[in-house]
């Protein structure tokens, strides 16, 4: 059970300091609000299997990707990946988030520097950093989800690179989700400008057929998901399968034995129906179930061979003062 504070009382890291969420005020002039010129990450922390500590999943990799996104938008992120990992564990400790949690780092254009004229620009605008942490359990649907192919195409790399997590680019994803949910689906799968599969709204797509696994490659206008990489390693180590990174035509989805999505939020979720057609037998397939199981154990630190994915938060050593007094 989490002892989470009310949202306004939660600690957030904002512009270099730990403050209460209710004390953060951002002006209406915040540049990123106007032009979508921010970048972000979504990170999960999991209660470990022994229930003693919390483990941040692929913490350093998330912050390396955040730095890469910042370079694209000329955002001056003043903390190294290692410092950001330390800030994150401190934030989880301060909020005493003992259950599963979600961490949302956000780096964004704040305000025009003196002498910079009003307008759309990347230079001459200050950078702000905020990191939020909130309780978030496992909402993965083990029984699988139903997806629709979106009529909205994924933004191409030549227009707005999907490989960076740019806030403004998520309007593209939001349009796709909106269309899919209005049609009664759980999520959207977007195609790229070439008509090949790109990705789901906030997850990568894997397709299984005759024991072979494929996923759209780095040139398919996708975010190179960290869960995607983790799943590729699990498939190699547990099943001896090398995933083919290649163009995946839409028709391959309809005729697959299994389709699943990977992402920090959804983790690994089976897709059992696409555009009203059942995938395989219309139930989660055996390979999807196997890697889901391994992933769930790995993120909670139960598998020593995947320990390099887990950053311990140190909750055990940060016992609450009241509890310590009775110890
Ligand atoms: N694609 C998009 C568009 C996403 O927003 C996400 C979630 N970050 C993913 C893929 C999956 O990436 P990851 O596994 O790193 O969470």
Image (cartoon, grey):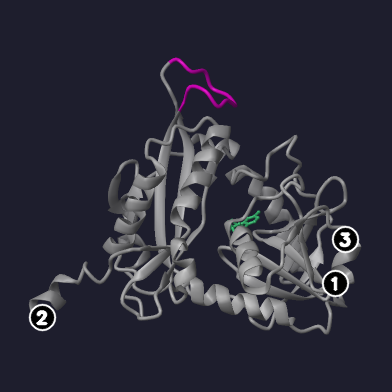
Determine which residue is flagged by label 1: 256
Tell me the tag on residue 250: 3
Residue at (64% x, 49% y) in the render: 170
Q: What type of secondary structure mainly makes up the magenta span?
A: loop
Height in image: 79 above or below 264?
Answer: above
Q: Which residues are magenta?
A: 115-125
Which numbered mark, 3 or 1, is in the foreground of this view? 1
- 320 in magenta: no
| Mark 2 beta carbon near ligand 1 (under 8 Å) | no
Residue 228 location, x and y as percent?
64, 60
| Distance from the alpha carbon under mark 3 to that under mark 1 | 10 Å
Residue at (48% x, 69% y) in the render: 305
| Mark 3 beta carbon near ligand 1 (under 8 Å) | no
Q: Specify which label sits upstream in the sequence, 3 or 1.
A: 3
Q: Specify which label sits upstream in the sequence, 1 or 2.
A: 1
Determine which residue is flagged by label 2: 327
Foreground pick, 253 / 217:
217
Residue most toward the left? 325
């Amino acid at each position: 059970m989490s002892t989470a504070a009310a949202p306004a009382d939660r600690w957030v890291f904002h512009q270099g300091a730990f403050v209460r969420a209710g004390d953060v005020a951002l002006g209406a002039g915040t540049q990123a609000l106007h032009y979508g010129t921010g970048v972000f990450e979504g990170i999960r922390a999991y209660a470990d299997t022994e229930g003693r500590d919390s483990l941040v999943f692929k913490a350093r990799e998330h912050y390396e990707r955040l730095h890469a996104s910042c370079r694209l938008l000329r955002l001056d992120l003043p903390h190294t990946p290692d410092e950001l990992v330390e800030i994150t564990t401190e934030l989880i400790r301060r909020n005493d988030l003992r259950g599963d949690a979600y961490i949302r780092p956000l780096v964004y254009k704040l305000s025009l520097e003196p002498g910079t004229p009003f307008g759309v620009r990347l230079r001459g605008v200050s950078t702000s950093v905020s990191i939020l942490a909130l309780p978030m359990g496992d909402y993965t649907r083990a029984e699988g989800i139903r997806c629709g192919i979106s009529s909205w195409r994924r933004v191409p790399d030549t227009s707005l690179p999907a490989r960076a997590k740019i806030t403004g680019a998520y309007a593209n994803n939001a349009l796709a989700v909106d269309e899919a949910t209005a049609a009664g689906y759980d999520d959207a799968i977007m195609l790229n400008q070439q008509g090949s599969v790109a990705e789901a709204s906030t997850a990568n797509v894997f397709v299984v057929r005759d024991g072979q696994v494929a996923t759209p490659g780095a040139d398919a206008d996708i975010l190179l998901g960290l869960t995607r990489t983790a799943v590729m390693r699990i498939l190699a180590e547990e099943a001896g399968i090398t995933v083919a990174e290649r163009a995946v035509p839409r028709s391959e989805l309809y005729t697959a034995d299994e389709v699943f999505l990977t992402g920090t939020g959804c983790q690994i979720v089976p897709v059992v129906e696409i555009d009203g057609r059942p995938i395989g037998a219309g139930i989660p397939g055996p390979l999807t179930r196997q890697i889901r199981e391994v992933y769930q154990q790995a993120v909670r630190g139960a598998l020593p061979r995947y320990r390099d994915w887990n950053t311990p938060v140190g909750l055990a050593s940060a016992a609450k003062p009241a509890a310590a007094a009775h110890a």
